Image (cartoon, rainbow, N blue to C red):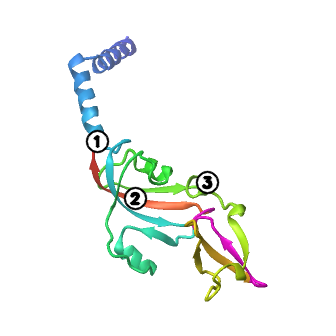
Amino acid sequence: MKKILFVVFILFVFGCTNQTNPSNNSKVQQNTSVSLANFVQVGDTVSVDYVGTLNNGSVFDTSIKEVAQEAGFALRDKYEPMTFVVGQGKLIKAFENGVIGMKVGEEKNIHILAKDAYGEVNPENIIQVPLSDINAEGIVVGSELQTQDGFQGVVTSIENETATIDFNHPLAGKDLNFKIILRKLVKN
């Protein structure tokens, strides 16, 4: 008899706590929509600080001056958060997608595979050119060259009066890691 009363009591208490109150439901929905205003969605304008690293931990880009100094970069004129509209496609898609759902002040780490960043190395973008066909004065391995059409490449080797030039993006074939800090969110 005690077990039956206990079960009835539990069912009564459980039933009371799960009863639906229409006014409470609308309040929950209102709070949910208000809280979404604090999180990044497609179409919002955001400002982020970031540190981009390769899998070996070396920094390849940052918006933070102290990180650039520590990495030994030649400093640029100004360092400030990068501002963009999420979903416009002006940045690597995986980077843009990485900020969705963040709130101001939040820090997030994302990993982007090479194929989703600057793509894999395309062997067709690595060419050999006789030194006599280019202005070879002062060209050494590591020299950056630009074609008349504006394509940029890097000399990767010089052998037998022939330069091998890689026109792939410098980060092609590399997985990228980003630490992102959301500094500002403007709902659009």
Nearer the N terminus, badge 1 or badge 2? 2
Please give the name of the residue rendered at 62% of the width and 65% of the height, measured from the top-left corner: 168
Considering the whole magenta stretch, tell me its main secondary structure: loop
The residue beneath circle 1 is 188
Q: Magenta stretch: give its range.
A: 159-173
The residue beneath circle 3 is 115
Q: Is residue 72 magenta?
A: no
| Mark 1: amino acid | Asn
Please give the name of the residue rendered at 36% of the width and 53% of the height, measured from the top-left corner: 84
Q: Residues within 10 Å of mark 3 (few under 14, many from 20)?
A: few
In the image, residue 164 sits, relative to residue 24, either above or below, namely below
The residue beneath circle 2 is 180
69 sits left or right of 159 in the view:
left
> Which image quarter holds the C terminus?
top left
Between 1 and 181, the residue placed more toward the observer is 181
Helix, strand or loop at label 1? It is loop
Nearer the N terminus, badge 2 or badge 3? 3
Residue 102: x, y in percent?
Answer: 36, 48
Residue lying farthest to the right in this orientation = 160
Q: Is residue 166 magenta?
A: yes
Please give the name of the residue rendered at 30% of the width and 38% of the height, measured from the top-left corner: 36
Helix, strand or loop at label 3? It is helix
